[in-house]
Image: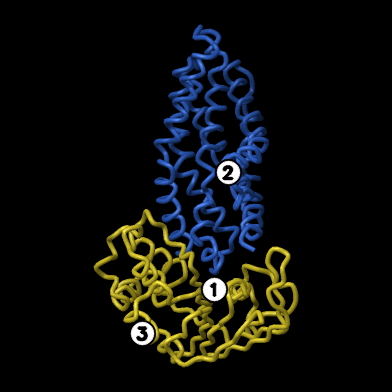
Chain colours: A yellow, B blue
Amino acid sequence: MIPQVSIQSLALSRGGRQLFSRLILNLIPGEAIALVGRNGAGKTSLLRAIAGLIAPDEGTIAFGDIDPAEAREHIHLLGHLDGLKSSRTARDELSFWTGFAGGAAGAVEAAAARLDLAPLLDLEVRRLSAGQRRRLALARLLAAPRPLWLLDEPLSPLDAEWRARFGEIMGEHLATGGMILAAVHDPLPLATRTVEIGR
Amino acid sequence: MSAVSTLLARETALAWGRGGGPMVAVGFYAGVATLLPLAVGSEPERLAAIAPGAAWVALALAALLSLDRLFERDYEDGALDLLTLSPVPLEIVCAVKCLAQWLATGLPLAMAAPVAAIALGASPQLSGLVVACALLGGLAFSFMGGIGAALSLGARRGGLLTAVIVLPLFVPPVIFGGGALASLDAGLPWRAGFALLGAYAAAAMALGPIAMAAACRNALS
């Protein structure tokens, strides 16, 4: 488990352009932070830096007393690229990512049921609509529990009903001591702290 | 470890379907082996002399053909990001991908290799060594080729770039394997060439994943 995330005086740049500097952010269990900022402000880059995919120019990202390399296995990253192969069935993909992320085999069905995916599991991923595909990506978060969720525009393809239901799911994650950092343009459907980056 | 076996099962299934999988690789191999007599002339003596080597070069080309999408699709659809968020080191992930690639194309090609060699006029008693060389050589091609595939990530027309990076790395196994086959054909000692091929394959399997993982991290950052 990751006890907390503490980001100290972080500076990130992409393609030679500095996105932001001196960013300070603390995330504790049970807390959700909505990252806001204009397009290109560096929200996605910040999430990728926390996931260890981008090295920061300056500053540190610490996970309590956990080694950053080890912390990766406690992180779920959900971006607009969902890693789902369109030629495979929803069941194959969900089972694979659940197994690879260390979830139990039985968790797949429960997660699929929670996101109303049960009738869709035997379809190829390419047959799913954008919203159904996003729900399939979200089902991974439930099937393989990990404390830190890094979400990049998690709501965008979802309809109003599913936005509300995903809000409930996020609430349950927080209630069990989870942490959420979400880059959003629309407000998240649950009470959160908002951090604006790239001003 | 269950995460590794899950990954191997998925990667093999994907490699089996990727660009037609084993049938296309074997078909390409058959095509090159058929083209050769048309180009050099069909006199049996001349063909028989070059048959084992020609089958071997065609094998290297067929292996190359199936390599270029090894990492590309996972890079494009975000799966490579998620593969790094795991207790399984990225080096192991890369090794598993290459192994799956070998299972899906290297093994079928090794089964096809003696057929092609005999069709070109090689002596049937070479078949055992042809299969053994193709199996080991295929491992070397997959693991060395994976380095090229990882280095060309994100480049436009990456497939062509992969070929340019990888072909020099294919030179040693082609020399060692071809040498072993020619020696056996001429009744000379062939074990040295075969042992060098095995050593090259072992080195590729040990060092290739480190280079591939570094190239993937670089492409993702």
- Callout 2 amino acid: Arg
SS state under label 1: helix
Nearest the camera: A175 or A150?
A150
- Callout 3 amino acid: Ala
| Residue highlighted by disc 1 | A73
SS state under label 2: loop
Q: Nearer the viewer, mark 1 or mark 3?
A: 3
Residue shown at the point (50%, 17%) measured from the top left: B122
- The image quadrant where one finds the C terminus of chain B is bottom right
In which image quadrant can residue B191 be found?
top right
How far apart, in angstroms, are the residues tagged by discs 1 and 3?
A: 28 Å
Q: Is residue B109 above or below residue A165?
A: above
Q: Nearer the viewer, mark 1 or mark 2?
A: 2
| Residue highlighted by disc 2 | B157
The location of residue B5, given as percent across then percent down, is 45, 59
Nearest the camera: B113 or A28?
A28
Instruction: Check residue B70 in the rendering and tell me which mark sits there, or answer none.
Output: none
- Callout 1 amino acid: Glu
Please check whether the numbered discs 3 and 2 fall on a single chain: no
Residue shown at the point (57%, 42%) measured from the top left: B159
How far apart, in angstroms, are the residues tagged by discs 1 and 2?
A: 34 Å
The location of residue B124, given as percent across then percent down, is 46, 19
Question: Dot 3 falls on which chain?
Answer: A
Instruction: Check residue A164 in the rendering and tell me which mark sits there, or answer none.
Output: 3
Question: Dot 2 falls on which chain?
Answer: B
Question: Dot 1 falls on which chain?
Answer: A
Callout 2 crowding tier (Cα within 10 Å): few <14, some 14–19, many ≥20: few
